[in-house]
Image (spheres, grey):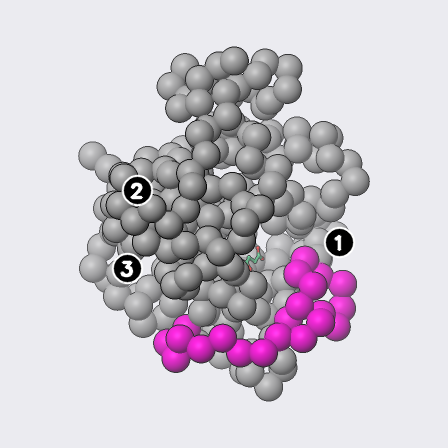
């Protein structure tokens, strides 16, 4: 049986703008994701591990296999329906000791999407908790469906912009603690961020932004993939999954069933 979403979880998402699913992917797949992050860091030593960005994914079969996992898509389908495409994905991997903060922001402020119908899955590659800089949210701030002004970031951080301070009441912030292999989901209007990682443990998570095929990506230079269902709206041009090339790509267990095949 696939993953199911309870009416309480759907209601929590509508009410608070986020929900937690503590156990979604198996330990072997999460270990592969963790090894994948180390492989990416060796391949791109010039990048900070918080900046393993979307465009690295466009030619990365394991990354695509991970975000197209049926357990994730079953959960996403309960929120956005059966025709699901990928908008973006980004590992935010904060090393122990000097992991950068993510300043308060609303995702929708940055995104070239029309309409702003999209859901983020934040997949934990490491246990993510208060000590190592888990995500923090201000529940209910998504409800006015308003994007507030952002300014240039005032400290070194993962994102270059942050919400103007008077829009943020951080006394209402909640820590989103999720064990390794679990996910949280959040709304594009929700005010959220995270503190620096001052612990000795890494805090690595994979953000995955899923859209229904009725959402258009308005940037031209962007690749997107149809993950489940059919393209009922013809708003975007979907790319085929890249074939796995031994030696170039990260090798993984489920290669035999990988949608892009082997070159
Ligand atoms: O990884 C984090 O700490 C923040 C993630 C985030 O801002 C997002 O997924 O939109």
Distance from disc 2 to disc 3, alpha carbons, whole Å, reads 27 Å
Q: Percent from the top left, x then y, of residue 56?
A: 62, 37
Task: Report the mark closest to the observer, 2 or 3.
Answer: 2
Q: Is mark 1 within 8 Å of ligand 1?
A: no
Q: Which residue matches tag 1?
A: 98
Residue 179 position, x and y percent, is: 47, 48
Position of the N terminus, as image quadrant, is: top left
- Label 2: which secondary element: loop
Q: Which residue is mark 3?
A: 9
Give the residues in magenta: 142-162
Q: Measuring from the top left, give residue 204's x and y in whole percent.
A: 59, 46
Identify the image quadrant of residue 86.
Answer: top left
Residue ID for mark 2? 231
Label 3, residues with CA under 10 Å away: few <14, some 14-19, many ≥20 = some
Between disc 2 and disc 1, the foreground one is 2
Q: Give the CA separation, mark 3 to mark 1.
A: 34 Å
Is residue 127 in view from this perspective? no
Disc on res. 6:
none
């Amino acid at each position: 049986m696939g993953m199911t979403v309870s009416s309480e979880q759907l209601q929590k998402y509508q009410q608070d703008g986020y929900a937690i699913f503590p156990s979604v992917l198996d330990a072997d797949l999460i270990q592969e994701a963790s090894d994948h992050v180390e492989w990416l860091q060796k391949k791109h030593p010039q990048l900070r591990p918080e900046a393993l960005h979307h465009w690295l994914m466009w030619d990365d079969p394991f990354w695509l296999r991970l975000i197209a996992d049926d357990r994730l898509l079953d959960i996403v389908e309960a929120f956005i329906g059966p025709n699901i495409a990928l908008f973006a994905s980004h590992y935010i991997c904060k090393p122990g000791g000097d992991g950068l903060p993510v300043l308060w922001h609303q995702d929708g402020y940055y995104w070239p999407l029309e309409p702003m119908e999209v859901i983020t899955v934040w997949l934990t590659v490491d246990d993510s908790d208060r000590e190592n800089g888990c995500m923090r949210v201000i529940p209910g701030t998504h409800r006015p469906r308003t994007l507030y002004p952002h300014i240039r970031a005032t400290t070194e951080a993962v994102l270059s912009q942050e919400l103007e301070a008077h829009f943020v009441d951080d006394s209402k912030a909640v820590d989103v603690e999720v064990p390794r292999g679990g996910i949280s989901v959040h709304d594009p209007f929700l005010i959220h961020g995270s503190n620096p990682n001052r612990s000795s443990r890494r805090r690595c998570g994979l953000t995955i932004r899923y859209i229904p095929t009725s959402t258009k990506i308005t940037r031209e230079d962007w690749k997107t993939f149809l993950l489940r269902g059919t393209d009922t709206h013809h708003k975007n041009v979907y790319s085929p999954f890249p074939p796995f090339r031994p030696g170039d790509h990260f090798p993984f267990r489920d290669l035999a069933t990988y949608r892009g095949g082997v070159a």
